[in-house]
Image (cartoon, rainbow, N blue to C red):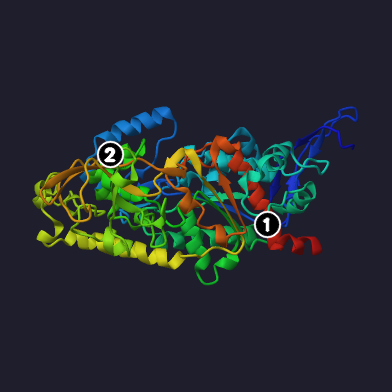
Amino acid sequence: MTENTPTREVRSEYDGQTVRAKSVLSPEGFPVRALVKLYPKRIIPIVFIPGIMGTNLRVKNGKGHAWRPPNGKLAGLVQVIQYLGKDAAARKKVLHPDRVEVDADGPVGLTSKVEKQLKGAPDLDPEKLARLFGWGELHRDSYGRILNTLQERLHDILKIDGTPDDAWVQLVLEQQKIHQFGAEKSFEEITPDDLKRFANAAYPVHAVGYNWLQSNNVSVLRLVEKIDAITDFYKSTLNKDCEKVILITHSMGGLVARACTQLQGKSDKVLGVLHGVMPAIGAPATYKRMRAGFEGVEQVLLGRNAAEATAVLTQAPGPMELLPTAEYQAKLPGGAQHWLRAHYSREKIPENEVTSFLGQGDPYDQVYLNKADWWRLVKSELINPLNEDRSTERNQSTSSTTDADYADPDFANYSKALLVAQEFHKRIKGQYHENCHAYYAADTAQSAWGEVRWAAKTAVPDFVQGELIHDDLNGAVKVKFGEQICALEIAGPDIPGDGTVPELSGQAPKPFVRQIFRHEGKRKGHVSYDHQGSYSNDLTAGLTLYSIVKLTLNSGILDEVNNA
């Protein structure tokens, strides 16, 4: 059989000991030959961890979906209509961290190629196998493309003649020569020989979701259990060598992975990590959303204003762990500064500008647990819309009553959740796996909040001390400073990013990782992507494959295979 002999892959079965395949005999003049792929002895599972809101959730005890983001335009329209009828109280009741759990029954959306690859036996349903691998736990529209791409490419690394598959040439070998995927550190290209070494192992693609309303301290325990279950499956059931996994993370999933690799003995279970668009030191957008509501379709699902967003987020440590950490500093003309301020500017003349930084110092105490100042993160009257005997008072957006005027058990409960978030921030500060890559966006077409700036309509000597007299709950307030009433409004996103994570937070892992990739959109010849869709393009798909190869080869694990 020559290199150019046409072949067809035939289905094989594996019982843990023997690979079996069936094909029919054909005349000598019939040129097509059967190809049976043998599964390598070494298995290195790829485990994808989604970002916040990327895991489907259901109400415990089989009481229906709690969170299943829409897939497709029609489904999106239906869900938007459903959520338009939910007020803050209804959202708070459904999206409670203790009342929901991971829903593994979401749509998986396999490509025809993946269906063929996963059809390992006549009675094996590819979709059921994909669910076994956790794909149904993740939002299909956000992650279906990358899961399918990884499965397709990692299954077919080389052609029958030992040269790289055409898709690898296009996604990795050619792209790396054009822009090095935006690498900021010394870059080493992958060679065809590297892929030959890499192909000495198999890389099945798994996904692990988590209850993103809970603290990541809790989510990490589920990830650890799943990693153990995955490696045990290949070792015990299929009799393969499988000790370590590679983690591919999106957004907040990176925080879960960082916590995982810090658990005693668990770093040894992880071969390497790729972090995608991770808010490594938090994102000011979280403050904006709690004071003014979400943007885009998320505003319909999670909150159109501060009342709806606060009701959900104050009971959920997970989202609060995306608040700016004590490390976060905004990049301003005067250098690194606190990320929250009020500002007045007339005709951009410096002499006419007034700036007051709000809550400098410890952000947890000065901003997040602040109960009195007009710029505090949380208005207590919005925390618990389910409390009927105080609902009228609590929903008065124009009330000047301060939180300190009455005892507040609701704020106490919120404080406990916030302190959990603070402890989590301390736990992962500066902590990364030793074999780690990361990528982030610094795209001017996808601006993000690098700071939160309350833009004032008139100047006052000092914006720190004032009495809140009106709040429209969408980021516009009126504050009384002495005898003067001033209108302020949260300004729009101000620095390059991905629409959610600013470059300041995305690039924070740089001192701690082997390689980091910076994407500046079309001005640098890169794809322009938003935060949620960061894995749904050829640039990051190629980068992910590149990183998987490099992380594997850098680990030396395949040297054991070659020397066996």
Q: CA distance from mark 2 to mark 1?
A: 44 Å
From what the image shows, is residue 412 above or below residue 143?
A: below
Q: Residue at position x 69%, y 43% from top?
A: 176
Which quadrant holds the N terminus? top right
* Left or right, residue 438 beside residue 188: left
Secondary structure under tag 1 reads helix
Residue in view at x 44 percent, y 46 percent: 54
Please provide percent x and percent y for residue 293. 29, 42
Return the residue at label 2: 304
Identify which residue is drawn at 47% across, 58% down. Answer: 256
**Which amino acid type corresponds to the residue marked 1 in the rendered image?**
Thr
How many neighbours does mark 2 have within 10 angstroms: few (below 14), some (14-19), or many (20 or more)? many
- The quadrant of the rendering that contains the C terminus is bottom right
Instruction: Say which of 559 and 125 sits in front.
Output: 559
Residue that numbered label 1 is attached to: 552
Question: Is residue 124 in view from this perspective?
Answer: no
Dividing the picture into quadrants, the one containing residue 489 is: top left
Closer to the observer: label 2 or label 1? 2
Q: Residue 539: give x, y in percent of width and height.
A: 60, 40
Look at 42% across and 28% down and name the residue there.
Answer: 73
Instruction: Judge from the rendering whether residue 563 lies leftward or rightward of residue 509; answer left or right.
Output: right
Task: State the image quarter where residue 301 is shown.
Answer: top left
Residue 98 pos. (x, y %): 31, 56
Quarter of the image for residue 487 reads: top left
| Amino acid identity at mark 2 | Arg
Look at the picture and state if 449 lies above or below 113.
below
Pointer 2 or 1: first along the chain: 2
